[in-house]
Image (spheres, rainbow, N blue to C red):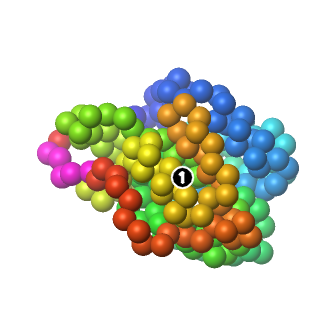
Amino acid sequence: MYYSPAVYEFFIQRMHSSERYEHISRLVGERTVLELGCGTGILQDKLERTKSYMGIDLNEKFVEHGRRNGRNVRLMDINSYDPKEEDGWEVVVLIDVLHHLPYYEKLLGRLLRSGKEVVVCEPFHSLPGFLTPFLFIVDSDGINDIRKVRWHKKESLLEFVREMGAHEVVLLNDSVIAVFNKKNGGRGHSGKKVDCVRGKKLSY
Ligand SMILES: C[S@@+](CC[C@H](N)C(=O)[O-])C[C@H]1O[C@@H](n2cnc3c(N)ncnc32)[C@H](O)[C@@H]1O
């Protein structure tokens, strides 16, 4: 899926309803948006009122495709983004990205300490244990080590976002959309262990 931007967009638009984008667009309103792990930058087309959008991603083909479609997307590693309150981005959005990142608690903690509002849209899985290796194969982005990434089930994802201090949580089909900011108690992760499946070393 991550080798072809056209295939990725075809599947992603069918896998998730348009409600998630509509909800995020309402949450963001006119504010400026930085999307981390933007893929091809589809979100830019869906935000109705934002004053400004930029997306960053490490997949070259995705970024090229996004640019060809007139989207403001750049090739950059999420981990090298240094959030500062005054950097101009009012809301940081992460859609379907946490389960790609080995150390996402640290990233969220950094974002929240900078005073940014953070919107996380994260899918959960409901597969029986013996099928979870397929999740990691199908969803391997070619960037992150699949042995270190984690997928949540619904309950553990809800527990995780509450632990992090989300002040607004919405359940939409197969995803949770959570809003965090320091002002409303967003605090980063307390270190409490939340149950989730971890990728295993797979020979493929
Ligand atoms: C499931 S896709 C989500 C794309 C987009 N947010 C969307 O909703 O269509 C996850 C994206 O995270 C990107 N990604 C993973 N690790 C990254 C990193 N360290 N820096 C930048 N992008 C990363 C992948 O390249 C992939 O495009």
Q: Which of the image's four quarters has the C terminus?
A: top left
What residue appears at the point 48 percent right and 57 percent down from the top-left corner? Answer: 160
- In the picture provided, is 48 more to the left or to the right than 118? right
For ligand 1, tell me if the residue under mark 1 lies within 8 Å: yes
Vertical placement of residue 148 versus 43, above or below: below
Vertical placement of residue 90 versus 54, above or below: below
Q: Is mark 1 on a helix, strand or loop?
A: loop
The image position of residue 11, as x and y in percent, is 48, 27
Tell me the residue that label 1 is attached to. Answer: 37
Per the picture, the main secondary structure of the magenta-coloured stretch is loop
The image position of residue 52, as x and y in percent, is 79, 53
What residue appears at the point 29 percent right and 53 percent down from the top-left corner? Answer: 198
What residue appears at the point 59 percent right and 27 percent down from the top-left corner? Answer: 17
Please say whether residue 202 is one of the residues in the magenta stretch. yes
**What's the residue type where badge 1 is placed?**
Gly
Q: Is residue 138 visible?
A: no
- In the picture provided, is 36 more to the left or to the right than 144? right
Magenta range is 199-203
Q: Which of the image's four quarters has the N terminus?
A: top left
Q: Is residue 115 visible?
A: yes
> In the figure, residue 183 lies in which quadrant?
bottom right
The image position of residue 165, as x and y in percent, is 60, 64
Please say whether residue 11 is one of the residues in the magenta stretch. no
What residue appears at the point 37 percent right and 48 percent down from the top-left corner? Answer: 151
- Total numbered labels: 1
